Image (cartoon, rainbow, N blue to C red):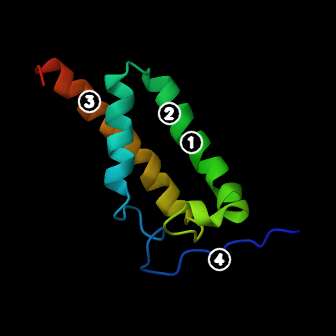
Amino acid sequence: MPTQSQPPAETGAVNSKLFDRFALAHAAAGFAFNRFNVSFTNVVLLAVGWELIERPLKDHFPELFPHSSQDTIENAIGDVMAVLLGWRLGSYAYKVGL
């Protein structure tokens, strides 16, 4: 059975802006990566890699996503930025003893 491509996110909707309500989840993932000693380079690779495979995953398994519309490029960049910011916050938290 052929898969159907998921529609792009509509303007103003989830997955359309630089940061949306899922940015916090992405930042939390970055924070967790830091706490598990995942290197910055590997976090960059994981974050970018996820954004690359997310599109076909949404096409093939849309039911796995709360919002299966395709991310805009702006949103994908924001997702990666949020992961990296979360990683950096994790590094800072470690340095100050949290």
Residue name at image x 42 percent, y 68 percent: 17
Query: In this view, which residue lies farthest toward the right?
Result: 1
Instruction: Find residue 73 and report its image quarter.
Output: bottom right
Q: How far apart are labels 1 and 3 at the CA level?
A: 19 Å
Residue name at image x 44 percent, y 20 percent: 39
| Marks 4 and 2, the one that precedes in the sequence | 4
> Which residue has dot 3 on it?
90
SS of the residue under disc 3 = helix
User: Relative to residue 45, is residue 91 drawn left or right?
Assistant: left
Whether the residues at callouts 1 and 2 have beta carbons within 8 Å, the answer is yes
Q: Amino acid at mark 3?
A: Gly
Q: Is residue 82 visible?
A: no
Whether the residues at callouts 1 and 3 have beta carbons within 8 Å, the answer is no
Q: Amino acid at mark 1?
A: Val
Task: Tell us which disc is closer to us: 1 or 3.
Answer: 3
> Which residue has dot 1 on it?
48
Viewport quadrant of the C terminus: top left
Classify 60 as above or below 48: below
Q: How far apart are labels 2 and 3 at the CA level?
A: 15 Å
Q: Amino acid at mark 4?
A: Pro
Q: Residue 26, position in %: x, y?
A: 39, 48
Classify 34 as above or below 11: above
User: Relative to residue 6, is residue 14 drawn left or right?
Assistant: left
| Marks 1 and 4, the one that precedes in the sequence | 4
| Marks 1 and 3, the one that precedes in the sequence | 1
Q: Amino acid at mark 2?
A: Val
Q: Residues within 10 Å of mark 4 (few under 14, many from 20)?
A: few
SS of the residue under disc 2 = helix
Numbered mark located on residue 70 in the image: none
> Which residue has dot 2 on it?
44
